[in-house]
Amino acid sequence: MMKGREQPGSGASETDFLKYLQTLCSDETLYNRKEGFFTHFIEQIDEQVSDSFFNKFGKLKTDEERILDTWAIKPVHTLKIQSFYKAKDSDMAEYFRKKGNAAFQNKENMEALVMYSRAVMKAPYNSEDCLSLSYANRSAVLYHVGEYQHSLNDIDMAFEAAYPTDLMYKVLDRRGQCYTKLGLYTKAFEAFQASERALSDSTLEEKKMASWRNDLKKKMQLCQGKTDKVQTSCSSESDDRVFAGASPILPNASTVVALKESNEAGRYAVVTRPVGTGQVLISENPYASVIPMERFGTHCLQCSTRLVAPVACKWCSSIAFCSASCRDAALGTYHKWECKFIDLLTGSGMSLNCFLALRIITQHDLQYFKDLEPLLHRPASLPSEKEPHRPHNYISIYNMVSLEEHRGPEDFLERSLMACFLLKVLQRADFFGRWDEDEGPPDRDLTEDELFIGSLLLKNLQVLQFNSHEISSIGYDKDKVNFKAIRNMSLGLAVYPTASFCNHSCYPAVARYFNGRKMVVINIRPLQAGDILAENYGPIFTHHDMQTRHRKLLSRYWFRCTCEACQGDWPTYNNMSAKRKLRCQTCAKGLVLVDPKKIQVKCPSCNTQNNVQECLAIITKADDSYVSAQMHMTSGQREEAIKTLTWYVDTLCKLTVPPIRELHQAMESLRLLFAARGTVQVRNPLKI
């Protein structure tokens, strides 16, 4: 298996060099070659398997057969699987809570927020008071820094954790104050009333209790007669509804989107009618998603939202959530199987693709997959009105391209070894029923259910190599918004069954941005009926020459691009001519402009006369709008810049033939501006 990992010498052929790059890229979708124990595990197995084994293994036809043969390799079972995670610690929780108290008393609110959050993470769920007190104390900090909704959430969490009855009046009063700040006077009045009733359970002296009652009565009087403010949605300002309504066949796509199929391109998305620049064509939540280990303390495991007041897992202190609803969704599905093995999984050095392959399984129970098993081996076909695409069904993942026919035995064995490792974790996590160490040795024969799930893990590892998408957000470096200085921030990895129908082009037609985990696909140039919804997988013609692009794509995605930019070998930004080529307004082919002062020019392709002076006048006006758009970007006027650039791109695409430097720069600017409609982060996240 380790063959092909040595860099070819200077005399190596292009084929050998591409094979080397392909091997490296394939490894990276599985594991980190420098960190974690999986690299060492691979090396150990490599020493034990013979050439005859590889010859036999390479002839296997199904993933079930590959899992069985891999499971039969004795050294595979020397890998010890046991729970390994950061457990709760009541002493540490109390230590952090006291540190939070000291910081709060010193008016060091951000330090107090961090310390209370650490206490929340460490406190056992069934602890006597520490967890509830930590949530309640943090609610006070959040109130003081103006995070009223988060303060209300923490008050709810304190109640859930059995906050002491004798102190209840305090947090109920704070609840009323939060509602008052939010302009919700009816709820505030009810909270102050509840606080007054709770005084009878307190241990306050009579004089202090009377003072509290008087104060609460004044607060209730201030609420009476006031009209509640209309609550506005706290969701993103982006309107991510698809253009022209949702398709009945592709429910996460616009009705103007359809699928086609060919031997060369597989299944791919096209538009069925002309679409102007800037329309939402796909809006899709992921089938499954994961965040990297370094985001565990800053972002919600369930929805990837940046944390302000993390809600703790009930079992471990590694994972945090943005809310009780996200926590309960995770604990009710995937995290109940992953929780106590989370540090083992991260310590293996396995890639996010592998986490995602596991998550696809763990977000359902065993019975879900058993019910689907009879349907999995049906040939994939284009969806129709009778059988529309079902993006939330595992079959949509199973039928994605995996390029199984192009894989060698070494690649299959590495992925089978990873699948067996993940399968062993599922066994110990009781995914198949209670695991009993006394039932047999680690290499005991697999049950039918275990073999089935092992084969699905192997299938997922193949599919995700080519079909996973990075979740990202936009970050600002400064308080003043300058859309020329924004940057992408990676938040995790996900799989999107509908968006995966977008093939690659070095001259992309669409870009994507994210509202939380939801991917929004929007076109950055006008499209005609039959045009492909082509996105860019990384190498783009404006920055990389054709040989570099082809190397990257062949290495990472195993195909050679034949897009318009590759067929024409378009130059990069630095090599583009300033001269523009006009387009015939009848057949869209290029015009030969010999005399720039001539009014009419005949098209050499269709013989139509074109008024080029009229076209040049419109282009001059468009160039002025391009300058205005750049000023809008610098001053943070996003929507004004989008409106101006959209008209500019539509105009130049209609009147000129690419490549044109300013046109492609405008398209890149639109990509950034559209992304800024989605998830935005303007300051560093809280780190716990």
Image (tube, rainbow, N blue to C red):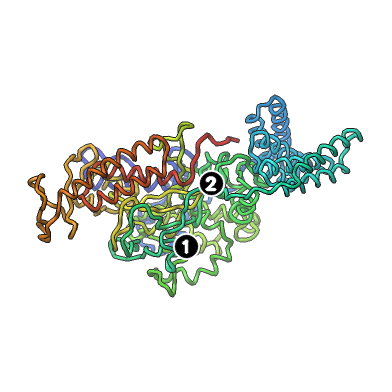
Query: Position of 266 compared to 580: left or right?
Result: right
Q: CA distance from mark 2 to mark 1?
A: 20 Å
In front of the other: 619 or 79 = 619
Pinpoint residue 401: horizontal percent, then vertical percent: 38, 60
Residue at 39% across / 43% down in the picture? 640
Pinpoint residue 550: horizontal percent, then vertical percent: 26, 48
Q: Is residue 231 visible?
A: yes
Residue at 41% across / 59% down in the picture? 243
Mark linked to residue 391: 1
Residue that badge 2 annotates = 304
Q: Amino acid at mark 1?
A: Pro
* Residue farthest to the right, as pictured: 206
Pinpoint residue 239: horizontal percent, then vertical percent: 47, 53
Instruction: Check if mark 2's residue and mark 1's residue have beta carbons within 8 Å.
Output: no
Dot 2 or dot 1: first in sequence order is 2
The correct choice, above or below, for 677 with respect to 110 in the image is below
* Residue farthest to the top, as pictured: 106
Residue at 78% across / 46% down in the picture? 162
Pinpoint residue 505: horizontal percent, then vertical percent: 29, 52
Q: How many marks?
A: 2
Q: Is residue 17 visible?
A: no
In front of the other: 616 or 264 = 616
Q: Amino acid at mark 2?
A: Ser
Q: Quadrant of the C terminus?
A: top right
The correct choice, above or below, for 312 with respect to 91 in the image is below
| Badge 1: residue crowd in 10 Å (few <14, some 14–19, many ≥20) | many
In front of the other: 10 or 270 = 270
* Residue farthest to the left, as pictured: 594
In front of the other: 73 or 467 = 467
